[in-house]
Image (tube, rainbow, N blue to C red):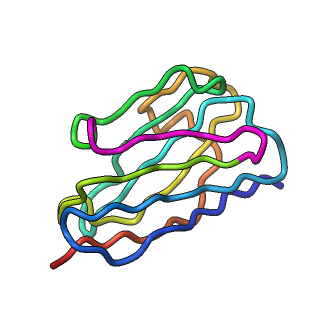
Amino acid sequence: QVQLVESGGGLVQPGDSLRLSCAASGRRFAKAMGWFRQAPGKEREFVAAISWIAGSTYYADAVKGRFTISRDNTKNTLYLQMNSLTPEDTAVYFCAAPSGVLAPTPNSAVYDYWGQGTKVTVSA
């Protein structure tokens, strides 16, 4: 059974930083992994993705330059460092992993495994 468990969310002020983590268990993910988010009343959207070797990353325009995705394959853990947070970043953040994709992709349809999400609220 594959499990993805996110952590690190919380309430922060605009301009603050947060680091999200996603611990994977059940198998070693020698595939790409990604982060998505869903704001209240909106559809889920792509945030960032990273390849297995971590040499290749892909970011949504809305977070480029502020967020950094990384992974520690020895710990089977995915990270999302979020800097310069704004209220528009408020959402539930999900990590996801595909069973058959190596390259980072924003296409949510190829991701087979999803975590339960961690809530990030950015408010003054």
Would residue 73 be counted in the magenta stretch?
A: yes
Magenta-tinted stretch: 64-76
* Percent x, y of residue 26: 84, 51
Q: Residue at x 78, y 52 (%)?
A: 2
For residue 60, side relative to residue 3 (left or right): left
Q: Residue at x 33, y 65 (%)?
A: 91
* Percent x, y of residue 108: 47, 39
Q: Looking at the picture, does residue 79 appear above or below residue 86?
A: above
Q: Residue at x 23, y 73 (%)?
A: 13
Q: Looking at the picture, does residue 20 appear above or below residue 51?
A: below
- Numbered label tally: 0
Between 45 and 55, which is closer to the camera in this rendering? 55
Residue 61: image quadrant is top left
* Percent x, y of residue 64: 27, 36
Between 117 and 73, which is closer to the camera in this rendering? 73
Would residue 38 be counted in the magenta stretch?
A: no
Q: Residue at x 65, y 62 (%)?
A: 5
Q: In the picture, which quadrant includes the N terminus?
A: bottom right
